[in-house]
Amino acid sequence: QVQLVESGGGLVQAGGSLRLSCAASGSIVSINAMGWYRQAPGKQRELVATITSGGSTNYADSVKGRFTISRDNAKNTVYLQMNSLKPEDTAVYYCNADLATIETMKRYNYWGQGTQVTVSS
């Protein structure tokens, strides 16, 4: 069974920084893209950043220049370094991974449970 476990969320003042981590575990054969999404109260879940197994990245316009996504393939872990945080970054942040397991030998999409990020003004 696959698990994506996020950590690193919390409360920070505007202008501060946080680093989120997400570790994938289970009978994983391969991981393609990994990414971070967020959902603020009353809003739809939106893409924050993604990274392929080869290291190609994609960012939402609202976080470009402030957030950096990276991954450690050996640890099946993806990170999100968030700098210059703004109150509008407040949301639950979800990890996402497109991966295959020994059981399925086919890629499916998996989500973490989410971690709260709150930025105070």
Image: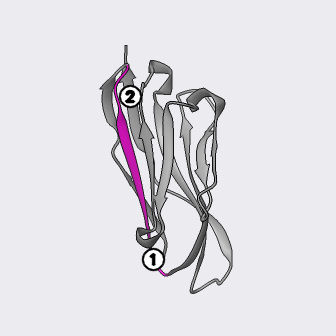
Examine the structure image and report whether residue 12 is included in the region drawn in magenta: no
Q: Is residue 86 above or below residue 55?
A: above
Quadrant in which residue 107 is drawn: bottom right
Is 25 on the left-hand or right-hand side of 38? Answer: left
Name the residue carrying label 2: 118
Name the residue carrying label 1: 26
Quadrant housing the C terminus: top left
Counting residues from the N terminus, which is met first, the one under dot 2 or under dot 1?
A: 1
Disc 1 secondary structure class: loop
Q: x and y percent of residue 16 in the render?
A: 34, 25
The main secondary structure of the magenta stretch is strand
- For the residue marked with disc 1, what is the amino acid? Gly
Is 103 on the left-hand or right-hand side of 83? Answer: right
How crowded pointer 1 is (Cα within 10 Å; few <14, some 14-19, many 20+) is rated as few
* In-front residue for pair 41/119: 119
**Residue at horizontal 40%, vertical 69%?**
75
Q: Is residue 70 above or below residue 103?
A: above
- For the residue marked with disc 2, what is the amino acid? Thr
Examine the structure image and report whether residue 18 is included in the region drawn in magenta: yes
**Residue at horizontal 48%, vertical 58%?**
71
Quadrant in which residue 119 is drawn: top left
Quadrant in which residue 49 is drawn: top right
